[in-house]
């Protein structure tokens, strides 16, 4: 199974990031979200997932996947500059999608930590 997965996603950092976004989408769909956009680009950045929650909130979702914890947990890697970029992206998204202008918004993070524990027990 792992070999098949590696053929599908590859081994580059961007391939592993894509795997994280696929897992995140599955999590959201299972929770009743409707995916509006994935990898929505704007000048100066990208929003991983834009989705509508079951309670009709427009969610801007940052996906973080880590295979090592050298720099902290996945969610700890979101710095103030990234937060500001996400806020700017959300403003641009809403201004270019007026159908969402009267909907409450929120910012979510899906943090995925993949760990290999050698000789675990």
Image: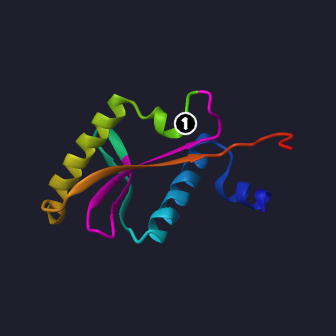
Query: Where residue 99 sits in the image (x, y, percent)?
Result: 16, 66
Tell me the residue at 20%/48% (across/down): 92
Query: Where residue 17 sits in the image (x, y, percent)?
Result: 55, 47
Q: Is residue 15 left or right of residue 49?
A: right
To which quarter of the image does residue 113 belong?
top right
Label 1 sits on residue:
73
Quadrant including the C terminus: top right
Task: Say if the magenta span includes residue 67.
Answer: yes
Q: How many numbered marks have been drawn onto this rendered protein structure?
A: 1
Tell me the residue at 28%/52% (across/down): 106
Quadrant including the N terminus: bottom right
Q: Is residue 77 left or right of residue 85?
A: right
Query: Where residue 11 sits in the image (x, y, percent)?
Result: 68, 45
Tell me the residue at 42%/35% (across/down): 78
SS at mark 1 in the image: loop
Give the prevailing secondary structure in the magenta stretch.
strand
In the foreground, 30 or 13 = 30
In the foreground, 76 or 22 = 76
Q: Is residue 50 above or below residue 70?
A: below
Tell me the residue at 55%/52% (across/down): 20
**Disc 1 crowd, CA 10 A, few/some/many (<14, 14-19, 20+):** some
Colour option used? rainbow
Task: Say if the magenta span includes residue 30.
Answer: no
Query: Where residue 55 sits in the image (x, y, percent)?
Result: 28, 68
Q: Is residue 43 left or right of residue 19?
A: left
Q: Residue furthest front?
A: 121
Q: Which residues are magenta?
A: 47-70
């Amino acid at each position: 199974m792992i070999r098949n997965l590696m053929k599908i996603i590859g081994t580059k950092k961007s391939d592993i990031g894509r795997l994280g976004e696929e897992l995140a989408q599955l999590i959201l769909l299972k929770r009743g979200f409707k995916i509006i956009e994935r990898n929505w680009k704007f000048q100066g950045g990208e929003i991983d997932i834009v989705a509508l929650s079951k309670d009709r909130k427009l969610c801007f979702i940052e996906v973080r996947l880590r295979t090592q914890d050298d720099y902290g947990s996945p969610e700890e890697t979101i710095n103030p500059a990234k937060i500001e970029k996400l806020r700017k992206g959300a403003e641009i998204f809403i201004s270019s999608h007026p159908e969402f202008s009267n909907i409450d918004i929120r910012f979510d993070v899906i943090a995925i930590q993949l760990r290999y524990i050698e000789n675990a027990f």
